[in-house]
Image: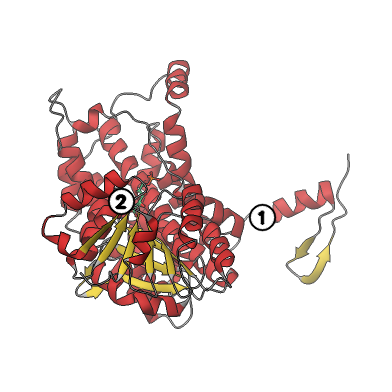
Amino acid sequence: MTKAQIGLFGLGTMGSNLALNIAEKGHAVAVYNRTAEKTGTFFENAGDLRERIVPCATLAEFVKQIKPPRPIILMVQAGKAVDEQIAALREHLDAGDMIIDAGNANFRDTIRRYTELEGSGLTFVGMGVSGGEDGARHGPSIMVGGPEEAWIRIQPILEDIAARFHGEPCAAWLGPGGAGHFVKTIHNGIEYADMQMIAEIYGILRDGAGMAPGEIADIFERWNAGPLDSYLVEITATVLRTRDAASGKALVDVIADQAGQKGTGRWAAVEAQLMGVPATTIETAVAARSLSAEKDLRLAAEKAYGAPAAPSITADAAFIDDLENALLAAKVAAYAQGFAVMEEASSEFRWNLPLGMVARIWRAGCIIRSQFLSEIATAYEASAEPAHLLLLPAFMKTMSGASPSLRRVVARAVEAGLPVPALGAAVTYFDAFRQGRGTANLIQGQRDFFGAHGFDRIDGSGEHHGHWLRT
Ligand code: 6PG
């Protein structure tokens, strides 16, 4: 075989699937894993695709098998392993070679790694890949950050392996440095918010209306044919319908109610806070996962305070419609927050993020893919200036129509003692966002009272202090 066009380092689930995807699209790929045994097993199971896969037992051989200048995808666990493998690879690479980190890296690490390699002749690219195992195998959404020349070199392969939305590849160069990994982090933050909101609606139907998983599945399935049409709503119905072979019960009923998290959602919330952009739906979704993990504490609190009353909500057709609209309105608020964080990061890091393009490449392949993203792409691309999503005409219409339902649903859930942190965050964010005259005047007064921090007056410029009454 002639030399491989690209290398893939790291044959875990995502790496293996990405390698098979690359080979299937007609590109010869050299593969390497630290434990050679895994490389052997991967190759044996690759079937017909073996003719375009070059399994390598050592790093030296791996590098030798790739045609220079070499693009090498690194798909190893985020964190220390990435630095270790870059150090190991560097020994063997030549000027012009490119390392593409395709894991879920923190974009600050990506910027550091890029800077560390600058001047060495090697190029570093941070590439967000979304879509889970299936996406990696058959078409993920690919978010690339790094030098544009690097993107131009790898673009043909990446576009070949990416998901397609009506023929358009869901892969794009989003900006220099950490832009790709940052966008992936916000994707995951929105993913957390989306999943949390869906779980809260499930909770209202399960605990408020006393519905069985199958009945709730029917509702989500129906919604998937409307404006909520999305991968997450679709799989929610499937997850709720699946039965446990051992107990015969709905599988969801035998799964422990403690959510895991690998960290990307938390990074999204932290970055939003660092930049001073409210992303309350993402923050509450992360916090809700953390609280879910505190099972013993929750059980003790339930014992101490008592559980909410038995099902008290009548899930008639009007209420189910309200739930659908509530989820839609809350989703708009979550995406508006996520996009506002990207907008701010774009100016802070001078990335010039193409937000319409971000929405475009999220329309297929990734976990938050939905028809809704087409509307975001169109709305951004139709607007001359970067604008807040909630101020784009299409979304103003959606929010005006759907927010009353969100308000009713949150009020009803709170009244029934059912937790709706993310839905609640969405409605309170919306209310605060559209409040022309807020209440921060009082906070400014308090700050000046105890700390002489000063305030602006509505009738004059410059900093002022109050002659406060002192008792
Ligand atoms: C994706 C996903 C993926 C993420 C998992 C698990 O876009 O394919 O976001 O990158 O790792 O969803 O994330 P948590 O363990 O944090 O839920």
Rendered residue at 38%/25% (across/down):
308
Q: What numbered label is drawn on residue 440?
A: 1
Say if residue 168 shows up in the picture: yes
x, y (%) of residue 362? 32, 65
Q: In the picture provided, is 319 more to the left or to the right than 443?
A: left
Instruction: Tell me where residue 461 appears, x and y as whole percent.
Output: 78, 72
Residue depicted at x 48% and y 58%: 86
Q: Tell me the SS state at disc 2.
A: loop
Identity, as a three-letter code, of the amino acid under mark 2: Leu
Looking at the image, which residue sits at the far bottom?
Answer: 384
- Mark 2 or mark 1: which comes first in sequence? 2
Q: In the picture, which quadrant includes the C terminus?
A: top right
Give amino acid for label 1: Ala
Name the residue that disc number 2 marks: 11
Local packing at callout 1 (Cα closer than 10 Å; few below 14, some 14-19, many 20+) is: few
Give me the C-alpha separation between circle 2 and circle 1: 53 Å
Q: Nearer the viewer, residue 180 or 85?
A: 85
Give the quadrant of residue 299: top left
Asked if one can make out residue 102 in the rendered structure from this viewpoint, the answer is no
Q: What element carries label 1?
A: helix
Q: Quadrant of the N terminus?
A: bottom left
Residue visible at 27% across and 59% down in the picture: 18
The residue under the point 49% across, 65% down is 342
